[in-house]
Amino acid sequence: MRQDIDALKGKFRAGRKEEAIAECEALCARADAAPEVKRLCATMHAMTGNHKRALELLQAVRDPAREDPDVLFNIGMCQRELKDIAAAVETFDLYARRFPGHADGWACLAEARSQSGHFDAAIAAADRAIALDPGLTPVWRVRANCHEALGRWTEAAADFKVVLSMAPGDAAALKKATTCLLEIGRGEDALDLCRDIVRRQPENLTARLGAEWVLGQQVPLWHVPMMNEPQRNQAYQDGLAKVVDPDALVFEIGTGSGLVSMMAARLGAQQVVSCEAVGLVARTAQKIVQKNGFAQRVTVHAKPSYEVKLGEDLPRPADVLVHEIFSSELLGEHVLPAIEDAKRRLLKPGGAIMPRSASIMIALVGGDAVAGNAWVKGWDGLDLSEFNAIYPRKRPLFREDLDPLLLSDSVEAFCFDFVRQDAFPPERKRLPLTATAAGECQGLIQWIRLEMAEGVYYENHPSRPQPVSGWQHTVYAFDAPLQLTLGKQVIVEASHDRARPWFVRVG
């Protein structure tokens, strides 16, 4: 029998797998078939993917009164491969209780429990496995995935980092670790993790791309053009010059690079306290402030404004509240709740606010360049228009060279008066827009206008393109292009939910 087993193993290893399995099955069919033959046949079936037959053979040789660890373990493995997770949990649970010193049993129990959705029980089993063998990479991965599934981002990130210390090339673990770290506001740690792997493995493309992705999540690309826009910067400086007195305490929401805070300090503010929600950006701003010699008067806190505490982060209610957290559509960076909170808690009664108001502006828009970026008709006799049905109606215009054709006067859709208003509820209204020229109208174009202080305005009007700008125009396309005649009135329903505006033609 020993010779038969060795010969079958040799055939299987030589690639004659079907022949070896057939001969082994013939031996199993004999009345005097030894358990070793059935176990060998089960192994060969499992190695060729026939886990159902392997399970039958293993169950035939199993003796519950005298459990064999290899037989019991492989029964659980076959059950797991056959997606019978409940049975696999039961088998591995028995294995772990009968052989508690075997780390692989606890590890497989952890994975099976994880697959069944019992994440806390899976973590408990993983802990037993790790206590026996801390070097089991797969069990750390199971533990990390369970913590992630439970929303325990800190624990998950720590576990994924252990996986990466053992397997720095594990792309899935790196992606999950960075995602978890971003969830808990530790963007710098996510960046450092990627860069550390790049230092150890310069060829690791996942780590290189991961570092860029983390930077993109932390530092949106509009930061640099925003800082380099002369009109925007001059408007902020001119507005600050109207409201900053030599003894003023200025509080700024949204530090960014620290430029506006340094403007206020240079204009004579006694103290400037600024806050920035993104830690990486806040710490970079503090370096910029230090480099420019304003560290004694400008303080940057790495936290959102609603976490700023009066008497701790801000010594007293500010004389001036400055904010620069506008998106291209004005509302996207939660400016309204931030202003409501800061006015109530952090600004003295009657204190100045800069900008003092902000408006969302719209006009009817047409022109071939806009049409080419808004609609598809066809090419060379081929009709492609069905694609318009799945193309978003809201379309940012990232190019300043499109020369949009305004077909109506500018209309102020919404105005937010930060000085006179303390709360900004959602709004819905209907607005008439009258065509000032005939032509094909693609929809509405939207931009923003800011009143910095009395007599000081900023507006990124579409008719005045800027070489660099952090704020883009947005087109809200109609369901189909509209042919306008001079004087034709178009009715638009305008609404916002405090976070986003929306515009749709209703007449």
Image: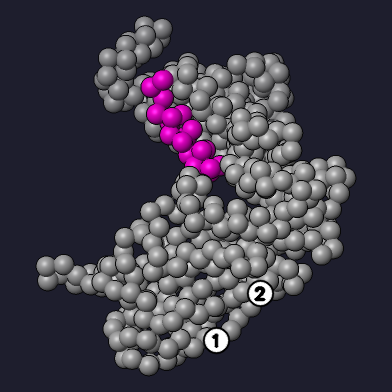
The Cα atoms of the two marked residues, 2 and 1, are separated by 14 Å
- The magenta stretch is 202-220
Mark identifier at residue 430: 1
Q: Position of residue 447 (x, y in %)?
A: 48, 68
Closest to the observer, 483 or 64: 483
Any part of residue 305 in sight:
no
- The residue carrying mark 2 is 426
What residue is shown at x 44% (from left), y 64% (from top)? 473
* Magenta region, main secondary structure: helix
Q: Does the magenta stretch include residue 321?
A: no
> Between residues 378 and 420, which one lies in front from this camera angle?
420
- Residue 217 included in the magenta stretch of the image: yes
Query: Looking at the image, which residue is at 71% across and 18% down?
Result: 131
Q: In this view, does 397 lie above or below 244?
A: below
Task: Between residue 451 and residue 106, name the one nearer to us.
Answer: 451
The location of residue 143, given as percent across then percent down, is 64, 31
Task: Report the amino acid beneath label 1.
Answer: Arg
